[in-house]
Amino acid sequence: MATVTVNGQDYTIDPTSDESLMDQLKTQGVEIVAACNGAGICQTCAVTVNSGELTEKTDTEDMMDLPDGQRLSCQCKAKSDLDIDLVY
Ligand code: FES
């Protein structure tokens, strides 16, 4: 299991799960805006990664010009404990 700190609050997720970081956090009640419902289009699920390791950027993320340190939570999974902040 991994601890993901979101806006200063801790949640426990399973880094071996097939679910995205967004889906695992939403299951625990984190209110992540997901206007495109995980299709990788809207960017409203973006998070700023303060520390920790995530899966490699997907082609979808590469095509978007995300600011440094930001990832789309619907497109990635945690590989370690994380400290992130929601962008929206
Ligand atoms: S939910 Fe739309 S890009 Fe992630």
Image (tube, helix red, strand yellow):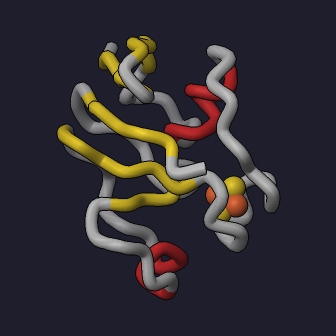
Work out whether residue 9 or residue 11 is closer to the camera in this orientation and state it.
Answer: 9
> Residue drawn at (47%, 79%), measured in percent from left and top?
59
| Residue 51 pos. (x, y %) | 19, 40
Q: Quadrant of the N terminus?
A: top left
Count of number-bearing discs: 0
| Residue 52 pos. (x, y %) | 20, 39
Figure quarter occupied by ligand 1: bottom right
Above/below status of 35 relative to 32:
below
Residue 65 found in image quarter: bottom left
> Residue drawn at (43%, 75%), measured in percent from left and top?
66
| Residue 88 pos. (x, y %) | 61, 49
Above/below status of 77 relative to 70:
above
Above/below status of 19 relative to 14:
below
| Residue 49 pos. (x, y %) | 30, 47
> Residue drawn at (36%, 67%), measured in percent from left and top?
57
Is 39 displayed left or right of 3 in the figure?
A: right
Residue 4 found in image quarter: top left
Is 26 displayed left or right of 8 in the figure?
A: right
Work out whether residue 68 or residue 53 is closer to the camera in this orientation and state it.
Answer: 68
> Residue drawn at (64%, 35%), measured in percent from left and top?
23
